[in-house]
Amino acid sequence: MKNTNTAPSTRPAAKVTTEVAAPRLTVKPQTMRAAHCRDGHYMNIVPVKLPNGRLLWDADAVDALIAGRTVKADPEKIDEHFARKAADASKVLPHIRAKTEAMAKRLAAVTAGEVA
């Protein structure tokens, strides 16, 4: 006999590792890691960072991207990511700091109308 129990699940949403999510999205794992480091998300998917540094991505959000649906990022989680990075400046490598500063200067120039 079939089970017709329709009670909602109390389990958290399924998560997948970067090594599983990347091939499904047809990118290299490092592409997802770099985007998370730089932007706090990859295509609006904000991963969960484990204490060992590994990232877990929401499987439903990955499936939504594959299906062509948009994924909405949680701005609070992205802000939390940047706050965590800003709290310990020693973790930011010099070449990343230089790129970030250059990008901030370009953005300031564009918003001030200095760039044609």
Image: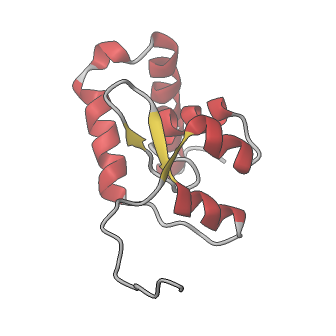
Residue 72 percent location from the top left of the image: 48, 66
Query: Which residue is most to the front?
Result: 1
Residue drawn at x 39%, y 18% is 92
Residue 89 x %, y %:
29, 18
Q: Is residue 40 visible?
A: yes
Q: Is residue 104 visible?
A: no
Kindly give the residue lying farthest to the right in the view shown.
Answer: 26
Q: Of all residues shown, which one is farthest toward the left?
A: 87
Residue 106 lies, in percent from the top left, at 54, 37
Residue closer to the observer: 110 or 39: 39
* Residue lying at 54% horizontally and 56% vertically, measured from the top left: 59
**Along the viewing direction, whichever of 23 and 4 lies nearer the viewer:** 4
Please say if 20 is above or below 95. below
Residue ID at (45%, 60%): 73
Q: For this view, does 48 lie left or right of residue 34? A: left
Residue 86, given in percent of the width and then of the height, sits at 28, 29
Say which of 55 and 107 sits in front.
55
Can you tell which quarter of the image residue 60 is in?
bottom right
Question: Which residue is located at x 64 percent, y 29 percent?
Answer: 30
Instruction: Please say if 32 is above or below 100.
Output: below
Left or right: residue 88 versus residue 65 is left
Quarter residue 51 falls in: top left
Disc tally is 0
How was the colour assigned to the protein in this rendering?
Answer: secondary structure
